[in-house]
Amino acid sequence: MTRSPLRLSDYCYLDYAATAPLRPEAAAALKPYLEEDSPWDLQANPNALYTPGRKAFEALENHRRQIARDLGARRPDEIIFTSGATEADNLALRGLAYGALKKRRSEGRAPENPRVIVSAIEHDAVLKPAQALAAEGFDVVYLRPNRDGFIEERHLAQALNDQTLLVSIQMANSEFGSIQSVIQLAEASHEFGAVFHSDAVQALGKTPLNLKELTVDAASFSSHKIGGPKGIGCLYLKAQTNFEPQILGGGQESRRRSGTQNVALAAGFSSACFAATQTVEDEAFRLAKLRDKLYAKLCAMDGIEATVEVEPSSLDYLPNIVHVLVSGYESETLVLRYDSLGFAVSGGSACASASLEPSHGLLALGISGDKARGALRVSLGFSSTEKDVDDFLEATHKVLNWS
């Protein structure tokens, strides 16, 4: 017997930090590309010289311009389309590190121990390439956060030296939601001549973001985290920033990332980005109220404590993430029990959800392995309502008193 598909309307989805449902605006932008009788210019290679190709290229560049405007980039060509944020992070770590090293060598001041600094609470898409750079001879330094989940400027200052080429510190954490002081951290890095990259995936659409004001040299973004299609993201690369391409081939994306671009996905991404950024302040206010209610009600239950202390109405943490530790339980058990009751939540990063090991981010906060194994993350989004929160709280009583 064929099982009917599970629809979002039949399920309470509370895992927006993992992925967001497709926004109506993005679905509408994608639709013309998916129709059987769609015009050929919607299917053509945007790098081809004939008319359909030129029209596809024009559409691609329109989407690039829209994303650049929504992110506050100075120029459209500062946006490099990628297959997603994981690729964007990899390109940033490797491309910026080797680009800066090449520049120093050309100036006759090659560092003996080229240094790369990252935070210990980064996504694996940053940590893994950092580890690869270490294996290739770079001196990689990992900054630990304080107990509240923040990278302190004084700790970065202690790690910076004249050998430092690159600093990469996330804009907002995907587990416990701390928002870093990126402007100050970037300025401190620039004083030592280092370039600064930030993984901004979780911040986009959840907190106001303007690349001109942030003064970062590079930043990574994802489409599907804001309700766009999966399989596309972008790397913002500030003009005149030294960068060594890591994906070689036909020289697309101004020779910085080879590979034929997907115009349909770019259309969906740009539509989602516009929708998310146009409503960000109102949405942040609305979601913060739901976040605060969840924290208050959950932490009033026996055996549940907040992973970090988030004050009501706090702007220091993402407005849509609630992260708690549940004593006596493992994350996997909690997630499966909620799932059986029709709720989607997680124990942390979706990219590591199959692992039973405690989160490296929680361990970096100084939380014990036993406590970290009971992590529970609830993340809200554009379709989340107060009823969802109330229903989830009711379900939590059942989850903790399972029989």
Image (cartoon, grey):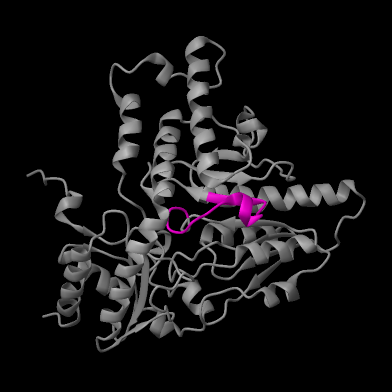
Residue at the (28%, 62%) spot, across then down: 14
Quick one: quadrant of the C terminus?
A: bottom left
Residue lying farthest bottom? 302
Number of on-image labels: 0
Q: Could you say where residue 42 lies in the image, as x and y percent from the top left?
A: 41, 20
Part of the protein shown in magenta = 204-220
Is residue 225 located in the magenta-colored stretch of the structure?
A: no
Quick one: quadrant of the N terminus?
A: top left
Compared with residue 77, is residue 71 higher up or lower down, i.e. above or below?
below
Residue lying farthest right? 108
Residue lying farthest left? 1
Left or right, 97 with respect to 300, comes to: right
Say if residue 159 shows up in the picture.
yes
Q: Could you say where residue 375 lies in the image, as x and y percent from the top left?
A: 36, 76
Q: Could you say where residue 311 lies in the image, as x and y percent from the top left?
A: 41, 79
Q: Could you say where residue 341 lies in the image, as x and y percent from the top left?
A: 15, 66
Residue at the (38%, 77%) spot, across then down: 312
Compared with residue 124, is residue 40 higher up or lower down, i.e. above or below?
above
Compared with residue 72, is residue 64 higher up or lower down, i.e. above or below?
above
Residue at the (18%, 64%) spot, across then down: 387
Say if residue 138 shows up in the picture.
no
Q: Nearer the viewer, residue 355 or 295?
A: 295
Is residue 205 located in the magenta-colored stretch of the structure?
A: yes
The answer to which quarter of the image holds residue 326 is bottom left
Compared with residue 197, is residue 323 higher up or lower down, i.e. above or below?
below
Residue at the (58%, 71%) spot, across then down: 120
Q: Nearer the viewer, residue 140 or 157?
A: 157
